[in-house]
Image (cartoon, helix red, strand yellow):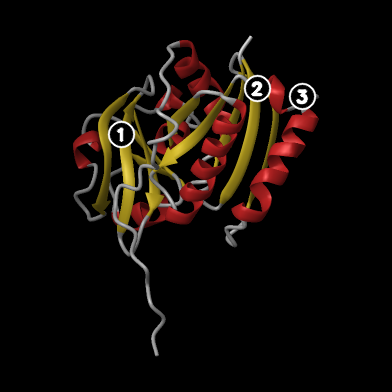
């Protein structure tokens, strides 16, 4: 039995799940543009544990969505995960945010899945997965134009999903593209991914682990 706590804070969705051997026991999440993760995350952890009739001492590992995503959101999730790992002497498991997003796709009718998270202007964070949800192109920050992802569209149907899909939808016109703008990263899909890593003892150094920001944080100043 491997009871794992999964934390997802990379975007607007504050999401917490608890799973046993990859089987979901409880999930608590709320998607809000206010990014109120600092207020909600620990409350959601307590509520998810209560829903699963468990407490912190029952946990055998903590998994966290490592990014890319919101700088502040990632900091909150990783800080909470590391704090729990230190306090409870538990292993830390890092889950790529785009991989868990890809797991929400129905791959029956598509050859490629491309999760995209909105960055600034016409930029997105993206990665490419095949029909078996195996990553075939690493995560990048890239500017969307009419040539984006064309190499995949000429080979088969491509599903682009996530909050960056609207930028793609407005620019990409190949008939093999389809879009789902409703997908947000969730701790639900982290359950099986974290269990797999736990079984493989694929864990992080708690002291030195940092989120995968992909780009440097830029503070935007308000105009005078």
Q: Which one is earlier in the sequence, the residue at label 2 or at label 3?
A: 3
Q: How far from the left and from the top, in percent, is residue 96?
A: 41, 34
Q: Is residue 216 visible?
A: yes
> At 37% from the left edge and 53% from the top edge, which residue is drawn?
169
The image quadrant of residue 132 is: top left
Q: How many marks?
A: 3
Q: Tell me the number on the disc at residue 54.
A: 3
Report helix, strand or loop for mark 1: strand
Q: How far from the left and from the top, in percent, is residue 189?
A: 54, 29
Q: Which residue is mark 2?
A: 59
Q: How far apart are the alpha carbons under marks 3 and 1?
A: 37 Å
Marks 2 and 1: CB-CB under 8 Å? no
The image quadrant of residue 161 is: top left
Q: How far from the left and from the top, in percent, is residue 73?
A: 50, 51
Q: Nearer the viewer, residue 123 or 191?
A: 191
Q: Which residue is mark 1?
A: 128
Report helix, strand or loop for mark 3: loop
Q: Nearer the viewer, residue 194 or 211?
A: 211
> At 60% from the left edge and 19% from the top edge, which residue is drawn?
60
């Amino acid at each position: 039995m491997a009871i794992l706590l999964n934390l997802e804070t990379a975007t607007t969705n504050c999401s917490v799940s608890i799973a046993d051997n990859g089987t979901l026991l409880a999930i608590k999440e709320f998607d809000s543009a206010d990014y109120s993760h600092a207020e909600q995350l620990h409350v959601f952890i307590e509520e998810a544990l209560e829903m699963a009739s468990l407490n912190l001492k029952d946990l055998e590992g903590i998994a966290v969505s490592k990014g890319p995503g919101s700088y502040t959101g990632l900091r909150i999730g990783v800080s909470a995960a590391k704090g729990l790992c230190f306090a409870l002497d538990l292993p830390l498991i890092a889950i790529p945010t785009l991989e868990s997003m890809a797991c929400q796709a129905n791959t029956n009718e598509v050859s490629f899945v491309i999760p995209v998270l909105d960055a600034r202007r016409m930029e997105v964070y993206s990665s490419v997965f095949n029909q078996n949800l195996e990553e075939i192109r690493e995560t990048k920050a890239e500017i969307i134009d009419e040539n984006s992802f064309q190499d995949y569209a000429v080979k088969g149907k491509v599903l682009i999903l996530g909050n960056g899909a609207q930028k793609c939808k407005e620019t990409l016109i190949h008939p093999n593209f389809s879009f789902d703008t409703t997908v947000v990263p969730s701790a639900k899909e982290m359950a099986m991914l974290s269990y797999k890593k736990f079984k493989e003892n694929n864990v992080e150094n708690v002291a030195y682990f940092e989120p995968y920001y992909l780009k440097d944080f830029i503070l935007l100043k308000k105009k005078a």
